[in-house]
Image (cartoon, helix red, strand yellow):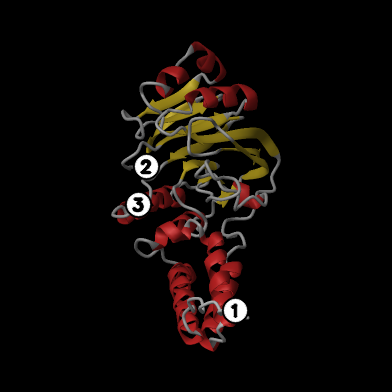
């Protein structure tokens, strides 16, 4: 009886030493990706591309930092373990809301205001905005990317004029256009200079002159970070020069609380309405993945005379942004 012929040995994988080296390299690359944004965040700077883009998604850096820590631990790489642990703890440290801003006013209640901001993505969400105006009945509205073809005619319709008899609609392009709507009398008060329109008005509310600023700086795309930083700097200058007037600064800031340029605006004493209500990291962009994944770059900032009471985010068909509504009390 013939014996069985043994099967030939299968192909062997790389030796353990090679696998260990590859895992350490992978951990090192992940940690390098995470460490740049964390270092800039700690130093209160936005850095250069790709750091500003990565800072917008800082909470999600926990994933590569955690993966790197696991790889380092699995290969018994002591330095990598220490580096990975520092990256994880550093990311967790920066997840808390940025708390700059003045204390809330304690004077008597003068009025209650509902403020809505929405980026329409080249006017594509105009029908959704009109529905939101009917449903939410805001008092002040900041609109970005108000195209002259769809948005501007819709906001000048008889229905919208009846609900918002006071308005400023400016800008001549799909992205450049912006609008400011109000139920209260207003006077144009100039604008923040930028590539995209950012109008401002003095609104008369219950005998008080309230400053209302629409915000839409250019995004920090590769090659455009310096322009983004400059235009957000102009928003900061406007906030710093507001004086004692109650102030609302609302719009698409193209920046999150993890960007130094945005925190500099908050350092003038205005406060992020959503953050004060525990919603500082509710994503507003991109709407395709928000709210599970994204960044909060749409904000309603309030001076201390305005106390936020409620914030909610709106899903608007036709745009890559979510809208934001903040209810606030104006104190005398």
- In three-dimensional space, the C-alpha distance between marks 1 and 2, rounded to whole angstroms, equals 86 Å
The numbered disc on residue 192 is 2
**Mark 3 vs 1, N-terminal side:** 1
Q: Quadrant of the N terminus?
A: bottom right
Q: Is 248 rendered above or below residue 226?
A: above
The numbered disc on residue 230 is none
Q: Is residue 180 visible?
A: yes
Q: Is 104 rendered above or below residue 158?
A: below
Tag count: 3
Q: Quadrant of the C terminus?
A: top right
Describe the element under mark 1 as helix, strand or loop: loop
Q: Quadrant of residue 207?
A: top right
The residue pinned by badge 3 equals 221
**Mark 2 vs 3, N-terminal side:** 2
Q: Is 195 rendered above or below residue 49?
A: above
Q: Residue furthest left?
A: 223
Q: Tell us which disc is closer to us: 2 or 3.
A: 3
The residue pinned by badge 1 equals 4
Residue at horizontal 44%, vertical 48%? 254
**Mark 1 vs 2, N-terminal side:** 1
Q: Tell us which disc is closer to us: 1 or 2.
A: 1
Q: Residue furthest front?
A: 1
Q: Position of residue 111 (x, y in %)?
A: 66, 33
Q: Position of residue 77 (x, y in %)?
A: 53, 86
Describe the element under mark 3 as helix, strand or loop: loop
Q: Position of residue 272 (x, y in %)?
A: 57, 50
């Amino acid at each position: 009886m013939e014996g069985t012929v043994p099967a030939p040995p299968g192909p062997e994988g790389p030796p353990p030493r090679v696998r260990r080296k590859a895992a350490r390299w992978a951990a090192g690359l992940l940690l390098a990706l995470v460490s740049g944004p964390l270092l800039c965040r700690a130093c209160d700077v936005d850095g250069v591309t790709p750091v500003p883009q990565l800072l917008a998604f800082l909470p999600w850096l926990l994933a590569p930092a955690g993966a790197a820590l696991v790889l380092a631990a699995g290969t018994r790489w002591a330095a990598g373990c220490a580096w990975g642990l520092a990256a994880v703890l550093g990311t967790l440290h920066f997840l808390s809301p940025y708390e700059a801003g003045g204390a809330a006013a304690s004077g008597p209640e003068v009025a209650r205001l509902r403020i809505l901001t929405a980026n329409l993505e080249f006017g594509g969400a105009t029908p959704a905005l009109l529905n939101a105006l009917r449903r939410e009945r805001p008092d002040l509205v900041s609109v970005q990317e108000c195209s002259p073809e769809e948005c501007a005619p819709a906001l000048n319709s008889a229905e919208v004029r009846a609900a918002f008899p006071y308005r400023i609609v400016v800008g001549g392009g799909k992205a450049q256009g912006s609008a400011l709507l109000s139920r209260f009398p207003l006077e144009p008060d100039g604008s923040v200079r930028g590539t995209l329109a950012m109008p401002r008005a003095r609104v008369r509310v219950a005998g008080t002159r309230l400053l209302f600023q629409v915000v839409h700086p250019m995004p920090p795309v590769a090659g455009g970070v310096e322009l983004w930083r400059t235009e957000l700097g102009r928003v900061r200058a406007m906030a710093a020069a507001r004086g004692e007037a109650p102030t609302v600064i609302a719009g698409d800031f193209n920046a999150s609380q993890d960007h130094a340029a945005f925190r500099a605006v908050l350092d003038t004493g205005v406060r992020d309405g959503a953050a004060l209500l525990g919603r500082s990291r509710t994503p507003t962009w991109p709407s395709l993945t928000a709210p599970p994944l994204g960044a909060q770059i749409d904000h309603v900032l309030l001076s201390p005379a305005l106390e936020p009471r409620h914030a909610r985010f709106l899903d608007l068909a036709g745009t890559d942004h979510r809208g934001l509504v903040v209810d606030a009390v104006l104190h005398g």
